[in-house]
């Protein structure tokens, strides 16, 4: 297809990986964002507090720092937890069977794959931004629309999925699209936790070929391609949804 | 004596310190068309919205076909329905037509009409569509079945809303000022449909400012004043011979 000093194939794989990470993070962030938005608008003080803490903390810390904190901190946390659980299980069992030999029921060291760490981190960060987009969208749905749903006997789940969700998406789409573009570009950060995305590959390749400008230019063009395609898809979606409004 | 289709007993409703309804009693039998009149702030819309629990009554009983809507006391929120399931089931039998139509704007006209039958009552979609098309035919909007509410005039939207209400074969139809948001030239088309419904024996509760409708179509009129029933009776009696001074005044100002 195109020659890149022998790096073309691995580079294409990296470009595909970038897209995967972005799309999966998007799914996670939309789910988290919806939950956080609903929590913020709920009557429960506890849910409200948790959601507000989540969005305030996440939006107040640079993405790069968060990624490092969650990747390394998550690693520590999971291993500490599995260590503690192992100890506790063994102690409990020894209490009943004194002859019991120490066994590692949970793996003694869990290595978080950078792939999932990246997706979880980006999904987590953008969930906070999505929460604000969705909160605004939920508030802009006309109350009468939900009242009609209530009056015709819908329960709260039907009310949400059959009326609230389709109507709020119309209002959420512009903000959602904006968040998606920023999210897509943020995937460039996953290279720092060792994921073989196209940014990491470009870095490695420019080191060995001494052609950093060429490689980073290609990375830039691929991102530009992704965002251009996204923008036209979003335009189409917005048009499709706006047909139904006056 | 038959069981009333809808029975309201000693209904009270307060918002914080503001008492809106101070003990209302009302029975609607099958085929009754009851007009509820009153100045703004008299509590007439609140009364209608309490019937299907869009507003939760502070106290009092509501019975639909003799079935009492069970309430319980909550420390924070006061009186609340004891069973959401029961309330949802009863609501699905009482269709409401709103002042601002409230058609679901993301659904086409036809989809609006089949939504509750299919997704609340579990009617097979094909069956619901056949029925919805007949109802739209009836309100004169069959040709507009694939339009979205935003593409229709107010009068047309309200007629679709009436078709949506008829689609659930309601025990009682609740009309909350159905013509108040309409331009004067569009009021007639909606009232004509409502007259038809009254004539075919639908049980209707109508909050309205349309004196002619109250006088000519309904068989019972209720006049509310400051949360109480100030005057009630057959329209031919109370319009010609009102016993309450306030109702006399009300008629003279509205006419």
Image (cartoon, helix red, strand yellow):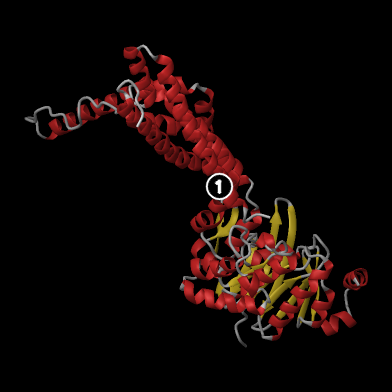
Q: Compare residues B32 and A150 and report the one nearer the observer.
A: A150
Location of residue A117 in the rendering, given as x and y in whole percent from the top left corner: 35, 29
Is residue A152 depicted above or below A71 in this figure?
below
Element type at mark 1: helix
Q: In the displayed orientation, state which residue is furthest to the left.
A: A99
Of residues B190 and B80, which is closer to you in this image?
B190
Q: Is residue A97 visible?
A: yes
Compared across the picture, whether B70 is left or right of A210 comes to right
Which quadrant holds the N terminus of chain A?
Answer: top left
Residue B145, compared with residue A168, is above or below; it is: below
Where on the picture, by quarter, is residue A81?
top left
Query: Would you call the spot at circle 1 few (<14 residues within 10 Å), some (14-19), or many (20 or more)?
Result: few
Q: Is residue B11 above or below residue B32?
A: above
Q: Which residue is mark 1?
A: A236
| Picture coordinates of residue B208, whole percent (x, y) | 78, 70
Q: Pointer 1 indicates a residue of which chain?
A: A
How many callouts does the rendering have? Answer: 1
Q: Residue at x 70, y 50 (%)?
A: B16
Q: Please provide percent x and percent y for residue B134.
A: 59, 79
Residue found farthest to the bottom: B1
Q: Is residue B6 visible?
A: no
- Residue A86 % position (x, y): 20, 29
Q: Going by the image, does A95 lie left or right of B31?
A: left
Residue under the point 70% across and 74% down: B205
Question: Image quadrant for the C terminus of chain A?
Answer: bottom right
Residue closer to the observer: B73 or B42: B42
Q: Which residue occupies 30% across, 22% down?
A: A6
């Amino acid at each position: 297809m195109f020659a890149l000093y022998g790096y073309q194939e691995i580079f294409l794989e990296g470009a595909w990986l970038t897209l995967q990470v972005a799309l999966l993070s998007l799914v996670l962030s939309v789910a988290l964002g919806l939950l956080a938005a609903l929590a913020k608008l709920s009557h429960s003080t506890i849910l409200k507090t948790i959601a507000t803490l989540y969005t305030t903390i996440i939006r107040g810390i640079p993405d790069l720092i968060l990624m490092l904190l969650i990747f390394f901190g998550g690693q520590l946390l999971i291993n500490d937890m599995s260590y503690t659980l192992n100890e506790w299980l063994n102690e409990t069992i020894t209490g009943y069977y004194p002859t019991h030999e120490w066994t590692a029921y949970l793996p003694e060291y869990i290595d978080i794959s950078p792939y999932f760490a990246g997706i979880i981190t980006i999904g987590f960060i953008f969930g906070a931004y999505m929460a604000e987009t969705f909160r605004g969208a939920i508030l802009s749905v006309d109350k009468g629309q939900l009242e009609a749903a209530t009056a015709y006997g819908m329960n709260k789940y039907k009310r949400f999925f059959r009326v609230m969700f389709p109507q709020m998406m119309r209002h959420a789409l512009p903000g959602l699209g904006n968040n998606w573009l920023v999210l897509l570009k943020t995937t460039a950060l996953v290279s720092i936790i060792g994921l073989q995305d196209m940014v990491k590959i470009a870095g490695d390749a420019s080191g060995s070929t001494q052609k950093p400008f060429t490689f980073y230019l290609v990375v830039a063009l691929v991102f530009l391609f992704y965002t251009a395609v996204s923008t036209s898809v979003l335009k189409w979606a917005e048009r499709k949804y706006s047909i139904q409004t006056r | 004596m038959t069981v009333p289709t809808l029975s309201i007993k000693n209904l009270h409703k307060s918002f914080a310190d503001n008492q809106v309804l101070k003990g209302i009693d009302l029975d609607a039998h099958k085929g009754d068309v009851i007009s509820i009149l009153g100045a703004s702030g008299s509590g007439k819309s609140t009364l209608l919205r309490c019937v299907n629990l869009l507003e939760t009554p502070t106290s009092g009983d509501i019975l639909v076909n003799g079935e009492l809507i069970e309430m319980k006391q909550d420390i924070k929120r006061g009186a609340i329905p004891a069973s959401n399931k029961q309330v949802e089931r009863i609501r699905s039998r009482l269709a409401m037509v709103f002042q601002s139509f409230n058609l679901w704007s993301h659904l086409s006209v036809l989809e609006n009409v089949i939504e509750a039958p299919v997704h609340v009552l579990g009617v097979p979609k094909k069956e619901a569509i056949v029925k919805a098309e007949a109802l739209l035919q009836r309100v004169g909007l069959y040709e507009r079945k694939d339009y979205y509410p935003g593409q229709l005039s107010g009068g047309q939207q309200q007629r679709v809303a009436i078709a949506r209400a008829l689609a659930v074969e309601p025990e009682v139809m609740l009309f909350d000022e159905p013509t108040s948001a309409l331009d004067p030239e569009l009021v007639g088309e909606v009232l004509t449909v409502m007259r038809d419904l009254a004539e075919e024996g639908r049980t209707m509760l109508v909050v309205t400012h349309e004196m002619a409708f109250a006088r000519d179509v309904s068989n019972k009129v209720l006049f509310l004043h400051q949360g109480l029933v100030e005057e009630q009776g057959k329209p031919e009696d109370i319009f010609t011979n009102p016993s309450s001074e306030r109702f006399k005044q009300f008629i003279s100002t509205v006419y």
